[in-house]
Amino acid sequence: MMLRSILIFLLSLMLAIGAPAIANFTPVTATTVRSNSAQSLLQQGITLYDREQFSEAIALWQQANQNFIAEQNPLGQALTLSNLSLAYQQLGQLELAQTSIEASLKLLSEATPTSDQAEIYAKALNTQGKLYWLQNQLEAALTAWQTAAQAYAQAGNQEGIAIAQINQARALQALGFTRQSADLLQQIYQQIQQQPNELKAIVLRNLGSVLRQIGDLDGSRDRLKESLAIATNPANRSLISLELGNTEWATGDRLLAIGRPAAEHLQAALNYYQQAHDLDGSLPAQLNRFSLLIAMQQTETALRQLPILEQNIQQLPTGRTAIYTAIHFTESWMKLTQSHDSDLGIAQLLATAIQQAKTLNDLRAESYALGQLGSLYEKTGQWTDAQTLTEQALLKMETIQAPEIRYRWEWQLGRLAQKENQREDAIASYQAAIATLRSIRADLLSVNPDVQFSFRDNVEPVYREFIALLLSDNSGQSPSQTQLQQAIQTVDGLQLAELENYLGCTLANLEQVSEIQDNKAAIIYPILLQNDSDDRIAIIAQFPNQPNQLIYAETSIEARSTEQTIRSLRENLEIPSRTPEVLAGAKTLYSWIIKPLEAELTQTSVETLVFVLDGALRNVPMSILHDGDRYLIESYAVAIAPRLEVFTPSPSPEALRVSIGGVGIEQTIDETEYPPILKLQEEIDRIARSVAIGTPLINQAFTIENIHQQLQTREFSAIHWKTHGTFSSDPAETYVVAYQERITANTLSDLIQVSSRSGVRPLELLVLSACETASGDNRAVLGLAGLAARTGTRSVLSTLWIAQDIPNTEFMAQFYQALSQPGITKAEAVRQAQLALIQSGYTTPHIWGNYALIGNWL
């Protein structure tokens, strides 16, 4: 076997990634550093760095540093130390990188201030910011880049200012300061308007790239097209076209995720990649085009590209680019129909990449290539050999810090151990992979699609596979309590990762919830487990006063039928005439989720069921589940809690005071018509009978400016808006309608945060009385949860589809009336309002089931 021979050859050599995500980090020189030998060594090192020969560059720069010390040239020494830090960062040697940059900055702080000193100081701060970013110290990275921008200004370097500010914007986004990030990017855009076109084009290209990475795809496209229109340099035009292709691909992926047509954007991406290649023979564009063709299942076209790509990659000069390009190429190639010849070609490319990495003494690249070769052996069923290679890849990680690669090989070892029935080893490897993922939460938010990373493909499966492993049949025994606790923790981890991925920022200061302050609530985790042979729904339940006694049950379902059943139920719920179909689906879901728990439920005093929902189940209100005689809401109050630590369930400390408003008149905004909401005034009047309200902002008064002015008084603990709106996993499709304008997702977050009383008390309740979630979008409800999580809002109550005005007004009036009573939780108030609708004759679940309470149910 030729693959086996390649492995033996590699092991006989005693075999015991992506590019930086931050803009413009290259080694620097300065004309003021005048020393023949030291300057020559400095420049030679830069040449080697540009060739990605980092170890050789380090050796020369270490010698140059000694020469600068001997010549008492502190600026030259500081410059060299900054470059050394960059090289160490490339190799994952972050402790050495930190020592170097600290020494550089110390020298610069003691140097006489000049424009040259300011230039070197700015670049050193930029390097320090990148190091902090790699260490997940986001606040420190932001501070370093803010100081770098000031130093660039002193040096008169306009491009440097823009690059440092772009990096600041990325840090702000990762920290959750979305509006500040957007404002800074707009400021950069305004600043460059008077710059020469070629410089302006470069900065616009960087702006377009970072806008894509923080989720603003429309803004990314606009800036990149503007950049392309003024750029004249063919190499720059090629890079811009490559970025445009990446943005169009990301747009297509986002549309596909919510079930919308994406062919136009994906074809545009192919065209831009071809344009980039035509301009200067761009290999990255050629490779991205190949990968996209495979993703679009245009296999024949991709196969025609394969020989040319393989030849071009083989001709690349030795360096990290050659290694990473080969790895990314093989990742895509492995998705094509496999044959012995293709396996052999992939193995040979990876073997060459491993040897090149060894020659360069690049442990990071060597680990990446070894692990990818292990992935090939995994796919060909040679699990022992795959395990050997994967262990070697992990061994290379011991002296460097590259967690974004490490978790992949820990995950790979987990899969391999499971295939070889080594259950305990598999569990240990998955635990290690998830622990590593948690350590790089911020990094995952900014990994670029052009290094072949996606949350759906590279993060979510780690959690789901581990949950399935924990809950799998273990010699005919049910999972142990320890395994059930681990499964719950992993579900919570996945929920948090999904929220952060949706928001594009980390959620800090989460409180550990060890005990729920509600002795009448049961927490239910319905978990979708799917494979090629069958579907399963696993149920883990935690009953009150039994924190250490989890109940487990599961239901086997016909393969690939679960999501179809759930999707059909949601679609039928939106159509009033389909109550019989709704009942059929509601009975099915009841048999999956609640029936296995009936015996335990009847033996307890549970009054509220809190669901931590998974996947497509988020789209279905659990209140409509039916046991054949009655709906679930007739027996229990119901709430949704995506992750308990995000919402910290506890009773509200005081009576509500509500900021209230909405638009009831007919409007047309950007060619979209919004029909009138006739009962707006009646709803406000009836709510005012039960709770204290502010001055209502109605119709023309319901503007962003007026809302901001009212909320900034911080007099309110709740917000109630009756107006049209949509929540989607696409931020561009998430908005609430104000008077003659849309309140976008980011602006909505900013407005709600204003209402927090100096950040001390979070908003208790946000009610969206006439909004809807995007149909068919499994992550649309995540948009509501994400809004709450980002703003610190403890509970959100929203309609899920377009509500009928009269019963919706009745529901809201009944909800606030119930909520104003002592001892009534939010979940029970929702239940009483729904039962009131049913008793009033609104018996179809299309009407009364159209409500979701998300977050704190108390």
Image: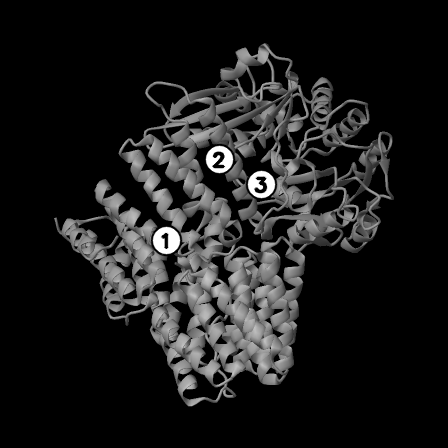
As shown in the figure, which amino acid type bears the numbered disc 3?
A: Leu
> From this viewpoint, is residue 562 visible?
yes
User: What is the CA distance from the residue labelled 1 to the residue labelled 3?
Assistant: 35 Å
**What's the CA distance linking mark 3 and mark 2?**
18 Å
Depth check, front residue: 654 or 694: 654
Q: Secondary structure at mark 1?
A: loop
Crowding around mark 2 (Cα neighbors within 10 Å: few <14, some 14 to 19, many 20+) is: many
Q: Which of marks 3 and 1 precedes in the sequence?
A: 1
Who's the residue at 64% across and 13% down the image?
A: 605
Describe residue 498's horizontal placement relative to residue 694 as left or right.
Answer: left
Residue drawn at point x = 57 percent, y = 80 percent? 119
| Residue labelled with disc 1 | 397
Residue located 45% across and 78% down the image: 65
Asked if residue 407 is positioned above or below residue 238 in the image, the reply reads: above
Q: Quadrant of residue 678?
A: top right
Three-letter code, disc 2: Thr
Query: Looking at this view, is 636 or 25 the one in front?
Result: 25
Lower sequence index among marks 1 and 2: 1
Residue 325: give x, y in percent of width and height: 32, 63
Tell me the mark number nearer the camera, choosing from 3 and 2. 2
SS at badge 2? helix
Dot 1 amino acid type: Met
312 left or right, relative to 59? left
The quarter of the image holding the C terminus is: top right
Instruction: Please determine whether, in this image, residue 386 is positioned above or below residue 9.
Output: above
Percent x, y of residue 273: 39, 66
Q: Are marks 1 and 2 in contact (CB under 8 Å)?
A: no
Residue at coordinates 25% horizontally, 46% vertically from top-left? Answer: 388
Mark seen at residue 490 = 2
Note whether residue 169 is visible.
no
